[in-house]
Image (cartoon, coloured by chain):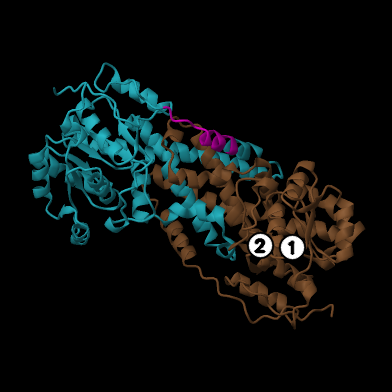
Chain colours: A brown, B cyan
């Protein structure tokens, strides 16, 4: 139940040096890790090198190096690039521990399974970001205080899980254990739905004279994420349509009911009081620390999934009973 | 075309010492004004007095004092309390310049007309606030850098308009001139609609396990205004239903179209790209300063309404050709 050195300070190989990958590279280095990475564009690589990081535009060389040092490979590319990257990983670094930072976990899980890489894979999702993208937008402190979801699906290996947990904690995040499908339903609600609502609000205001002239806090906050690159918003919403549809429908029902009440000069109490009550509950939502679970012990995945559902988080490394031992 | 002293430093009488009224009292005093006010609750008055302000629970005495010193009366009470306050103003201080700080201008205009006080009334709306309410939540700097709408409806008197303009500028706001109906349509879009969307988002998340556990920036921003007291949200949405309905319907159409596209595995480009483009336009929306209009000159109201529609704002006092002179 000790933490072997290779688990706590495993070298990190970051594939894709955009906002998340680039921030991860900075955060892992700041935590004293060996970290190197690949980026498709020369500009990103040049910028990373100029800042003193170890970056390359050669994917296969980078993956071969990952295999040689038994690095944890972090896939930080957009969804559409994933299948190609996974093929390269299978060819050059199939035995490396593998994770990702994509906002939709079910679809990634499927692609990884197709590539035959499930045995060494643990899906991840750091719940952070800004409206900007690219290496230049990165920040070593992007993950500090943010939830970082790690999937506890049935297949996950305790050793790989612990390796990724240590990286997330090194970056300053706390870890939320969750099943991929539960993650995707929650992400649809608290990330993808807000994006669609923000887009609808911004687009509506664009049609009303004087609206921009009067816009203040509630409009700025309500449309902030509409500044996100449209491709990213589309990619995450469309990839998670299965989970997004029911929550979008739920929100639409509430809004349509309120619309009809307004039209009939009736109070919109149900929506307003329900929303207020939920927001107040959220403000007082507590995050009990998960401390008793042993990674790799019997039922450890179910135990972590249940704890995560109840708001539980991992703030300092749990012990591991490593199945590879 | 000078600025008579009584216009630039008119004493201010604030009726209602909640978040906005209490902040206004602090800001006006900080700007060197004589300021006194009325509040219904003893607690609010005691707190204001303890902080060194001149406050009373006696409405008629306060209004008689306003009449004696020819103060500008600022109605800072919620919509439902307005008719009663207006009756008292008519009885005790009918000749005073009168403004309000309510978020719906058409309905206030109607009440003021019913009370026979339109001649000395200029509707106002400082576009600022926090999720908190009451005297204790007030802040002398609440108005700094915020738009403060002043109505340029056909009836408004140049002298009263200038008096209220000076108060808004003294509080650190910039003035946006607008007709009441155009203000209400814009406010429906950039304030009331965001409140309904935030309530729907919070209420939906309240139904999804793990949602609060994963909530991050986009959820926090998207639901911030759902923390507003439900009575305030209901009051502003219901009082502005006429203008809120068409913009709510517009947003609903966009969202329902996106919903159907997601269900058919089609891209949600229209909503996402339209929203992004509008938000980017908003980010680069410029606010040219209005400098050439003379308040009280021919067509001054139309001129200001057109300038406000184009984004124009008043950052330093315009000259007045006073009709009372």
Position above or below: B14 against A270:
above
C-beta proximity under 8 Å, tags 2 and 1: yes
Tell me the residue at 20%/44% (across/down).
Answer: B83
Rendered residue at 60%/39% (across/down): B271
Residue B311 coordinates in the image, percent (x, y): 43, 29
Q: Which mark is residue A123?
A: 1
In this view of the protein, which residue sits in the foreground, A83 or A59?
A59
Instruction: Name the residue beneath numbered marker 2.
Output: A183
Q: Dot 2 falls on which chain?
A: A
Give the letter of the chain under mark 1. A
| Residue A37 located within the stretch drawn in magenta | no
Q: Is residue B40 left or right of residue B105?
A: left
As for residue B279 lying within the magenta part, the answer is yes
Find residue B266 and report its horizontal and vertical position in percent.
70, 42
Rendering coords of residue A116 (x, y %): 87, 61
Secondary structure, mark 1, is loop
Which quarter of the figure has residue B93? top left
Q: Which residues are magenta?
A: B276-288
Residue B164 seen by the camera: yes
């Amino acid at each position: 139940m000790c933490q072997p050195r290779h688990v706590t300070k495993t070298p990190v190989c970051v594939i894709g040096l955009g906002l998340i990958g680039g921030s991860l590279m900075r955060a892992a280095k700041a935590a004293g890790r060996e970290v190197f990475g690949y980026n498709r564009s020369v500009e990103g690589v040049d910028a990373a090198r100029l800042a003193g990081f170890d970056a390359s535009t050669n994917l296969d060389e980078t993956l071969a190096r990952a295999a040689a040092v038994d690095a944890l490979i972090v896939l930080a590319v957009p969804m559409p690039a994933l299948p190609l990257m996974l093929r390269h990983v299978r060819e050059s670094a199939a035995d490396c521990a593998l994770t990702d930072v994509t906002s939709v976990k079910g679809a990634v899980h499927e692609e990884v399974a197709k590539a035959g890489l499930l045995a060494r894979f643990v899906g991840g999702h750091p719940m952070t970001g800004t409206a900007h993208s690219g290496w230049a937008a990165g920040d070593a402190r992007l993950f500090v205080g943010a939830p970082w979801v790690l999937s506890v699906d049935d297949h996950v290996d305790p050793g790989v899980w612990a390796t990724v947990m240590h990286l997330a904690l090194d970056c300053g995040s706390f870890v939320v254990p969750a099943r991929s499908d539960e993650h995707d339903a929650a992400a649809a609600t608290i990330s993808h739905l807000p994006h669609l609502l923000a887009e609808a609000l911004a687009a509506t205001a664009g049609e009303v004279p004087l609206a921009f002239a009067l816009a203040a806090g509630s409009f700025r906050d309500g449309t902030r994420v509409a500044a996100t690159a449209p491709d990213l918003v589309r990619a995450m919403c469309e990839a998670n349509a299965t989970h997004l549809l029911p929550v979008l429908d739920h929100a639409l029902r509430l809004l349509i009911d309120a619309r009809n009440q307004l039209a009939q000069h009736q109070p919109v109490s149900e929506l307003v009081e329900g929303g207020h009550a939920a927001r107040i509950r959220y403000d007082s939502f507590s995050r009990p620390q998960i401390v008793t679970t042993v990674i790799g012990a019997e039922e450890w995945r179910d135990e972590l999934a249940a704890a995560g559902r109840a708001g539980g988080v991992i703030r300092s490394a749990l012990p591991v009973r490593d199945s590879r031992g």
